[in-house]
Image (cartoon, coloured by chain):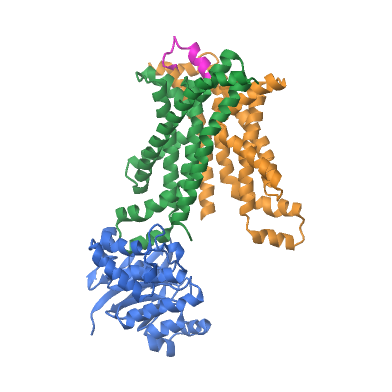
Amino acid sequence: MAHSAINVFFAGNNFSRILQGLWTSVWIAGASLIIGLILGTLLGILRTLPNKIIRFILRLYLEFFRIVPTIVLLFLFYYILPRTFHINWPASWMAVLAFSLWVAAEFGDIVRGALESVPLVQKESGLALGLSRVQLLRYVLLPQAVQLELPATINLATRVIKTTSLLMMISIMDVVAIGQQIIEANNQKYPTAVFWIYGLIFFLYFIIDYPLSKWSKQLAAKQNR
Amino acid sequence: MTKEVLRVEHLNKFYGDWQALHDISFTLHQGEVLTLLGPSGSGKSTLIRCLNGLEDFKSGAIYFKGQKVETNSKNWQELRQKIGMVFQSYDLFPNFTVLENILLAPVKVQKRPEEEVKTEALRLLKRVGLEKYVNSYPRELSGGQKQRIAIVRALAMHPEIMLFDEVTASLDPEMVRGVLQIVTDLSQVDHMTMIIVTHEMNFARQIADQVLFLENGKILENTPGEEFFKHPKTNRARGFLTSMDF
Amino acid sequence: MSWQIITQSLPIFLKAFELTLWLSAVGIICSIIVGILCSLVQYFKVPVLHQIITAYVELARNTPLLIQLFFLYYAFPVIGLKMSAQVCGIIGLVFLGGAYMAEGFTGGFAGVNSSQIDDGKALGMNNLQLARYVVFPQGFALSMPALTANVIFLIKETSIFSVIAIPELTNTALDLIGMYYRSNEYLLVLVIAYAIILIPVILLLNYLERKVRYGTFGD
């Protein structure tokens, strides 16, 4: 019984479809992370500037993403962009946009925290060497900040990866949506398919996220020593 | 001959492959003050921490009042009630008031009646001049005050030996004297048996009945206090005393 | 944007609001209990249980709640374990939240200064006394920031209950959008509803966090 149900993975082109779905999830996560990290670095730097208005606006921006659940965020983009602004992108682009802005908000906060925790003496000795503010940022502050922020950044990445499971809510054919299709198509033949397919997806997420979170924990432990 | 309180025989301690203590042996009698001197990293703190089981050791033995110490955690826990220790970090428990810090171990560990311990705690606090801080939290105190209270906290357990591990090393210079005065008093008035790790040479000279001079985890000298400061036997000890320049 | 659409939907949203609050509260309280129990096992390194809980924490933290819920709601009935959507939701949330809370408390206990532990040992405390008077009180205070983050996280995660048709806030908004095709209005109410829940919670927890820190770690 169990043995036959496992066949559902290999019936027809099921396996390659699952991998295809996985790829959709992976590229959306990857693209969002790349765009979000670049944008977030800028936001983080802006938040260390003395201009109160910029800081206030960026703080509001961050708090908005802190309060709105990601699933709601996806729907905001999915419904409002086409209906109100007549922007008719594919759903996967909307997802990348929503995730990128979310990542940018959270990463901006990580960058700000890291920049602020670089010891003052580092800044002062950079300035004493005659570095300009931009050079100081480029050669002294950002390289040190990157080290400090690495564990939190990896953690953020694991969250983005887990959140890709919501993509099917805005009708993107991600790994979960394809899993559902396979389950429905095979319900008659393999009644326990639901167990195996969700089990496989559970496992796929785990083998991506577990090494990442382990790595982040190790880095953090090393820094605390 | 006074009673022997502590005897250490051939103690060896390793951190991985690295030997931190080499064949340490000495004896301490009732009312004596033993001072551990030596450059930083010589193993003084490691040794004093071995003496109440905060560090384990590979071989050798410790005898407390003639009885060999079984080095299991249960036994150490019993024994620590008779061995008071004060650390460099002057850490009181930040979640308790001064009085609660002092009462905690006598009442919860030794199960002595709270009223009795409280009376004693107040008397001890008065003795170190801090009775008005009885209900303060540690954060409201200076480093020197915290360290004096840490001593009171250890004394409230009625220890038979007191271990002092660099108790003034993290203090502001003006706080140091008050703390050292209390330790001196303990020796002169109460005849407390003590082992002291310190960098305060004048204090060590004044208080030490016996000096162990350590370097690289070995005892280079085990001499009566006066003798060590007047006529150090080894070049190492002479160099050390000169470098301390007191 | 129509004001009328919004006011008409308010009674429906109010019900959903109550349900979200209720599910969050139950989920968070149970998660804290599970988290404390697990972190105690981890602290005392209880044989066997220790390994099981380590595995549980890693599994729960590194997989999405959505898949956990699908498993409970769709896959478990196949092996004869049928539960209502709300029960599945709570179990899923506590499965996830318990692991996050356990991690937070364990981190707090581990963060207690080793010199504090030396102090306790030097005063002759046994392991239980050390835990009770030194490690736990200080460790819980240290884990307050993690607790705060987890509470906010879990409240937001209840939005995922919408995938198993629990009529909480997000599910209700999606239903209304599906029926009346007025996305702007319903999404606005939805976002505001989350803000009404989360802003006071964030403010309260930040206040508590500061208070706890001030109360025990002044220096």
Is residue B157 visible in the rendered image? The answer is no
The spot of residue C166 in percent (x, y) is 46, 21
Q: Give the blue chain's letter.
A: B
Q: Point out the residue furthest to the bottom here.
A: B230
Marks counted in the figure total 0
When asked about the image quadrant of residue A55, the answer is: top right
Whether residue B175 appears in this view of the structure is: yes
* Vertical side of A12 occupied by A123: above or below: below
Q: Is residue C137 above or below residue C152?
A: below
Give the residue displayed 71% in from the left and 52% down from the top.
A137
**Quarter assignment of residue A168:** top right
Looking at the image, residue B125 sits to the left or right of residue A218; the answer is: left
Quadrant of the image for the N terminus of chain A?
A: top left
Per the rendered image, the range of residues in magenta is A178-193
- x, y (%) of residue A203? 48, 29
Q: Give the green chain's letter.
A: C
Residue depicted at x 38% and y 83%: B207
Identify by letter the chain in orange.
Answer: A
Left or right, A168 with reference to C115 = right
Residue B29 location in percent, x, y?
27, 79
Residue A183 within the magenta-colored segment of the rendering: yes
Q: Nearer the viewer, residue A9 or C66?
A: C66
Q: Residue at x 57, y 15 (%)?
A: C178
Image x and y of residue A61, in percent: 64, 37
Task: Give the residue at the far top of this rendering.
Answer: A188
